[in-house]
Amino acid sequence: MVGTGRKLRIALVGVGFGAEFAPIYKAHPNVEWVALSDTNPEKLAAAGGRFGIERSYPSFEAILSDDQVDAVHLVTPIPLHAEQAVRVLEAGKHCACTVPMATSLEDIRRIIDAQRRSGKNYMMMETAAYTREFLMVEEHYKRGEFGTISFARGSHMQDMEGWPEYWMGLPPHHYMTHAIAPVLKLLGKRVKKVHCFGSGLLPQERQKRYGNPYPVETAIFRLDDSPVAVEVTRSLFQTVRPYTEAFSIYGDKLGFEWQQIEEEDPMIFSMPQAAFSRGRKIHHEMVVPPDRQDLLPPEVAPFTKRSVFSDGKHLSFVQGGGHSGSHPHLVHEFVSSMVEGRKPAIDAITAANWTAPGIAAHLSAMRDGEAVEVPDFEMELDSVP
């Protein structure tokens, strides 16, 4: 436990989508209390009333100055992530942050440095690393059932029309951790270099904020110390396709493909045991990934199946249980890491390794597919005196 055995005190910043996490923290057995904060007073009051949470903070600064707060969970707009994370860590508090970690290599390094100097935990709350689908595939992989991996791909396609202004013209691969994180976590590798091409053309007005001309980007990543290549496509605008956050992976014994449509189930492919012959038939089976409540304390386990906003319109709510049941797993890992005095599973270096490939990919796209190396942040950290 924190300090002399007491439970944790958490401040949750951002109660739009972030409100999904409020009752999970409130129910967690190692959390004393959760407080809410938002720049919209009406939304803040409504969320507090809905979940029976009386504690709130009128500003981010008020949280940083309160010594009672042990940890801060940021669910704020992308442009704020890096600066807010650094300030949380410099204030001597643990930090959880929604994806992406940052949108520049410089800001990634600032967060790593702030985490190192503070000694506090930083965790990027990557939902794709805790979905039912990923946890199922991870079990198959750990048992060696895939055999030798030969290829993997990720895809995140989502129409962002009508979303907040900061999304307009965002480089697609600046927000691609959902598509690559499952593969990198599964293989235990980092990206070494990338070739990427942009596709399509945004209207001139939409290019102004970020200088990005592309509604879609497709990249091929070379992993460090691995023969496996990973393909990732990310679309934000001008692409008529239902929402998907997907990954697929193929070995010489087993293959997995995420469902084409979110309402469907994923597919497992397996090789017949018969000797090789021309035209052999590969088996396919649609599977229902098991719910993994067994990995969680009973107080928060039900949240894998129950979405907080049962009447909400955000896609994570509509899908049920929030991003395929991942939310309580994220909360439990963040809380457990603090209670046990260890690094979280998605610590600052891991978060950097999952975020930087997208930043490098966009740089490559802007250079017409030129190879761009991805920094080795762990090696950089080891060189710090």
Image (tube, grey):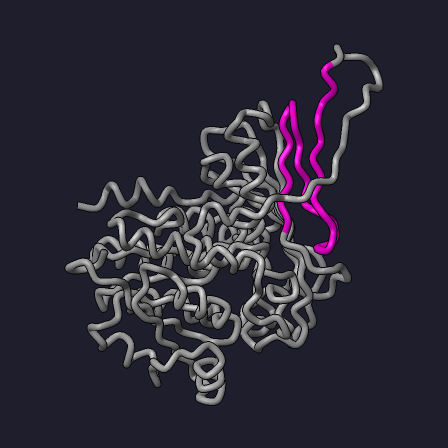
Instruction: Identify the residue at image location x=17%, y=60%.
Output: 3
Q: Is residue 257 magenta?
A: yes
Expressed as whole percent of the image width and height from the top left, the position of residue 320 reads 62, 61
Q: Is residue 293 magenta?
A: no
Instruction: Identify the residue at image location x=81%, y=19%.
Output: 280
Expressed as whole percent of the image width and height from the top left, the position of residue 23 reads 45, 69
Q: In the image shown, does 379 or 255 lie closer to the viewer?
A: 255
- Name the side, left or right, on which 272 lies relative to 368: right
Extreme residue in the right direction? 279
Extreme residue in the bottom direction? 42
Instruction: Identify the residue at image location x=57%, y=65%.
Output: 307
Count of residue discs = 0
Residue range in magenta is 246-273
Q: Is residue 21 above or below residue 264?
A: below
Q: Is residue 207 visible?
A: no
Expressed as whole percent of the image width and height from the top left, the position of residue 282 reads 77, 26
Expressed as whole percent of the image width and height from the top left, the position of residue 64 reads 26, 74
Q: Is residue 186 visible?
A: yes
- Name the side, left or right, on which 25 lies relative to 65: right
Q: Is residue 109 above or below residue 54?
A: above
Extreme residue in the top direction? 275
Q: Quadrant of the C terminus?
A: top left
Q: Is residue 103 above or below residue 45?
A: above
* Residue 121 quadrant: bottom left
- Name the side, left or right, on which 30 lies relative to 233: left
- Name the side, left or right, on which 236 lies relative to 228: right
* Residue 321 quadrant: bottom right
